[in-house]
Image (tube, coloured by chain):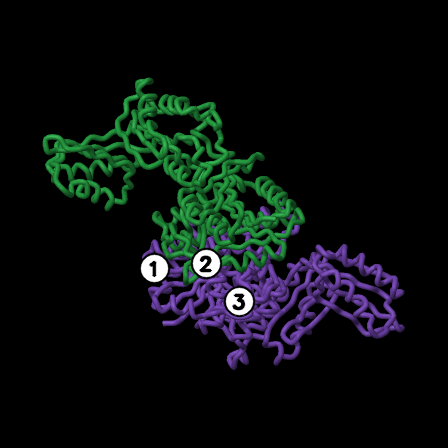
Chain colours: A purple, B green
Amino acid sequence: MALIVQKYGGTSVGSVERIQAVAARVQRWRNDGHDVVVVVSAMSGETNRLIALAEEIQPEPTARELDVLLSTGEQVTTALLSMALHSLGCSAVSLNGGQVRVLTDTAHTKARIKSIDKERIQSHLQQGAVVVVAGFQGVDQDNNITTLGRGGSDTTAVALAAALSASECQIYTDVDGVYTTDPRVVGNARRLDKITFEEMLEMSSLGSKVLQIRAVEFAGKYAVPLRVLSSFEEGPGTLITLEDESTVEAPVISGIAFNRDEAKLTVVGIPDIPGVAYRILGPISDANIEVDVIVQNVAEDNTTDLTFTVHRNDMARAAEILQNTAEQLGASEVRTDDKIAKLSIVGVGMRSHAGVASKMFGALAQDNVNIQLITTSEIKISVVVDEKFLELAVRSLHEAFELDQAV
Amino acid sequence: MALIVQKYGGTSVGSVERIQAVAARVQRWRNDGHDVVVVVSAMSGETNRLIALAEEIQPEPTARELDVLLSTGEQVTTALLSMALHSLGCSAVSLNGGQVRVLTDTAHTKARIKSIDKERIQSHLQQGAVVVVAGFQGVDQDNNITTLGRGGSDTTAVALAAALSASECQIYTDVDGVYTTDPRVVGNARRLDKITFEEMLEMSSLGSKVLQIRAVEFAGKYAVPLRVLSSFEEGPGTLITLEDESTVEAPVISGIAFNRDEAKLTVVGIPDIPGVAYRILGPISDANIEVDVIVQNVAEDNTTDLTFTVHRNDMARAAEILQNTAEQLGASEVRTDDKIAKLSIVGVGMRSHAGVASKMFGALAQDNVNIQLITTSEIKISVVVDEKFLELAVRSLHEAFELDQAV
């Protein structure tokens, strides 16, 4: 007898048949004696359909009205899943964001949850019903509909699990867990039974798009056990937990994340004076361009170079801004490169193990992969390499750290 | 400077182009200095699409969840129309049933409005915004979503107009007003400038499906001036008003309504004893079959006949039930006929004019139309005739009462 929060994404509820399959799965958990709260996304394709309608009318739709529009997608799914549960003889009731009351700030299209009322959900659970909640949405203090932005349903699920002190928050997706790296790149990539929140944060921000990063942060903050599972097949998935004593025995490296969405920009020959980094990155940030890696090395001959990466789509705009700044600063040159890839090894174990970095660089050197940039954090080492070496580099590292073998 | 409530049905908002046309019309009323509250239906086809999805999952969808599902249709339209107004530079805000707060009873799929909060709408109007309200929906006292049943958006509009003491409630449809009879049957049928609520009630319940009967009742009860107009062309439409002194000069007959959806059932040779009508019609009502006309004539030889009409789709079921009752009562026979049509002349003027009935029967006799049944009310005389005579009968009466000529 536990309270489980389950979240099903758009593809998991993308058709009548899929919704019926979800209902059957929910009913099995009920039959095992558990209380179940289900959070659902809009049926796959629906959100895009609604956005297309909106943009046909208003190229940049009003944020408040876009939220009113998009929130209907999840509401439709809650009703259909409740009906599917009813047709199996399973008591169920749907609630939208306002009915639960998921209270958010007023930042339409990217609202943040401020609080969740648990009374109504608990009352339905006590009456034996499965509670089906519309993910991704809430209301502000004036009862205006808000949405949480992309992947917001994950956040809804975790926030509900935290508010209800659920035993587990299960995120059902189209993959059966978190892998040591992308199985499409490394054939013997291994599903992890467990991963810590910190590792998961590094993995998801680096392109393992299994879980929304905000949801993982939220789960870590409120110590909600999070499990990633497949909605298409049975299996234990991957449990995302707090780092505890067991992680002393944890592997040094848990996984390898990578992405090829970035481009690299370098300003060469900047005078080495205070405030230069701010003068370079300030205008980039003012233009709402997100910067990922930033590397500045020690100065030589009173000049230095600064390199940073942005999303490839932003490279042209960033380069234009940078050219201006470079002229003002008297820098000698701006270089851009969008043929790069970033890869990172992630693991809480590296804190207590020396030589992880040198092992990484050694493995890459052995396969003649030139490293362009290096950055490190407590539990992560990232390198930027020429895009064409990406798969080779990932495979080398996967083998070097023996990630195919369970600990 | 007046407050106008406008309601646009599904075909009037059936596409992006149509929504943009509605926005342009609303903006014209704003530019003329009026405050405007707009009530919208779901885009045409959307409600049927959602019902089909629901029925695929649950042949008889749970009423509560069906309301959750269907209410999204109107919400989508409110968001899109608000965006269309914004793109014209017109301030606008959408509100769903719960946000307005349209409080209803808990009768899902056919809820009745108990009260409407006007504060939020008034506050938005004071700020210069057009308020776009989702029709057809409300919430019960526990904030469960309810819907008002077919045509409920008309009811929402009238109820809002009453709550806000609007100067006029304008119902935009695909016809440009209320006609003396169906122009497809009588070529020179005439659009009425005015009609009383009572006449409109009789007209709409008899098949002139311009307005939902509940909305007309509501408008009459709260003396809300109601106007039916076309959303596709300009024009004054038809104003539906309280009967006032001007109706002393009103025409005897305002219009001719008809329908061919009914079937006639007769029980012949019933013993003429008290309680017979109840014993015959009770089981019909218990089977949720709606009965329209009921006629029982005086008894002869201690037996009598009772005739009533039901919707054609219900005739077979009604006949089966009736056969049972007839045997129990010792009646001699049950007769059924679904080749009938009902037509009615309607007019508040007939109260003060003698000879209306005889003029009607005379006109029908002259064209050899045999009358099968006659019923009358204060402002209406209805006859049932063989279906094949319907058009002939309507045309005869339209001419006899000179309905093509404005008074």
Identify the residue at image location x=24%, y=38%: B317
Please tell me if label 3 and label 2 are on a single chain. yes
Label 3 lies in what chain?
A
Pick whichever, A219 or A378, lies toward us. A219
Identify the residue shown where x is 72% and y is 61%: A289
CA gap, disc 2 and disc 1:
19 Å
Where residue A89 sits in the image (x, y, percent)? 32, 57
> Chain for mark 2?
A
Q: Who comes first in sequence, dot 2 or dot 1?
A: 1
Q: Taking the image as drawn, is residue B215 in sight? A: yes
Left or right placement of residue A315 versus residue B174 in this view: right
Whichever of labels 3 and 2 marks the residue nearer the N terminus, that label is 3
Q: Is residue A232 visible?
A: no
Per the image, label 3 sits on a secondary structure element best described as: strand
- Amino acid carrying mark 1 in the image: Cys
Please give the residue where the numbered disc 1 appears in the rendered image: A90
Front-lying residue, A350 or A92: A92
Alpha carbon distance from label 3 to label 2? 29 Å
**Residue B332: image x %, image y %?**
12, 32
Q: From the viewer's perspective, tell me whether residue B340 is left or right of residue A394.
A: left
Which residue has dot 2 on it?
A231
Disc 2 or disc 1, which is closer to the eye? 1
- Front-most of residues A371 and B118: B118
Q: Tell me the crowding category of disc 3: few under 14, some 14 to 19, or many 20 or more residues within 10 angstroms, Cα based.
A: many
Residue type for callout 2: Ser
The spot of residue B253 in percent (x, y) is: 40, 30
Give yes or no for contact between labels 2 and 1 (Cβ–Cβ under 8 Å): no
Q: Nearer the viewer, residue A325 or B54?
A: B54
